[in-house]
Image (cartoon, rainbow, N blue to C red):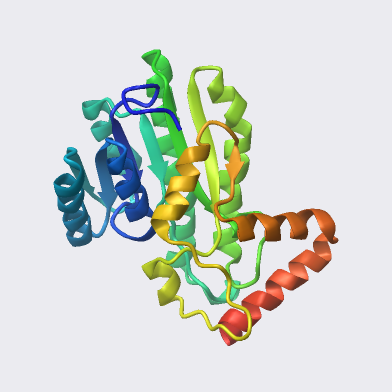
Amino acid sequence: MKEVNGDYGTWALVAGAAEGIGEGFCNVLAAKGFNIILVDFNALAMGELASKIRQEHHVETMQIHLDLASAEAAMDCMKAVTTADCRLMVYVAAYSRVCRFTELDQSDLDGFLSINTRTLLHLLHGFSQRLISQGKTGGILLVSSLAGLIGPRGVASYAATKAFSIRLTEALYDELKDSGIDITVCCMGTVSTPTYWKSKPSFEKMKPPVMQPADAARYALSKLGSVPICIPGFTNRLQYFVLMNLIPRRLASRLVNNAMKKMYGRKT
């Protein structure tokens, strides 16, 4: 990762900042000296986190309280980006739900499309356009999931929208680098977040490795600009290598689906 006051400037925007992985990114970036633009729907948690990082790391913060599913979300974020001359963006926000595809309702489908794809795409477009038009360098880190690399049952829409950000980053990695903009997508495995524990996973003999948000964020930031796709956690990287390179795709899919059945039972 580039240094503060270098190619990424002094401000970072974190979309989906209030808790979990977003909170981990805020803490790690603030420790590196970045001022933080926090974007989240949870105003209380966001305010508490902003106060904490100001006190602990002596950085500045801006808070944007909004629903990232709204049609104006990207525009509202870009206003703050312009005001702060922000040149580093981390998009963590995601809509997720563990259940069978046919049990989703219309609001669920809209959540997957708006938060995981539409707002992300508009914000990425506006952010990179601004940097290019002003001749400035910058960095973009998108947070995806291993589910986007091999789609498991029970999270079909989530996996599909996470695959979108992976393919998007692969396509833009060289294209944006021509203009001095780094982009990387981080495919997270299991991370200890409120959203993950609220899904109520069940563990039998085998428990997946659960990373801490700050550790996952630290690894992802270390890879920004050096590779288009990164996977935090040695065990996650090893499992992915085995699934994608050493066994047939059909068998890999069956193993992943069986693991989801054991973890979530009838929900999937």
266 over 249 or under it: above or below: below
Tell me if 62 is positioned left or right of 180 in this view.
Answer: left
Tell me if 173 is positioned left or right of 17 in this view.
Answer: right
Which of the two residues, 133 or 44, is positioned nearer the viewer here?
A: 44
Picture residue at 36% right of the left edge, 53% below the top? 24
Picture residue at 56% right of the left edge, 53% below the top? 162
| Residue 67 image point, x, y percent | 30, 54
| Residue 61 image point, x, y percent | 19, 41
- Residue 55 visible to the viewer: yes
Picture residue at 66% right of the left edge, 62% below the top? 151
Residue 29 position by quadrant: top left
Which of the two residues, 70 or 193, is positioned nearer the viewer here?
A: 193
115 over 177 or under it: above or below: below
12 over 159 or under it: above or below: above
- Residue 69 visible to the viewer: no
Picture residue at 41% right of the left edge, 58% below the top? 213
102 over 205 or under it: above or below: above
| Residue 110 image point, x, y percent | 45, 59
Q: Quadrant of the C terminus?
A: bottom right
| Residue 74 image point, x, y percent | 35, 40
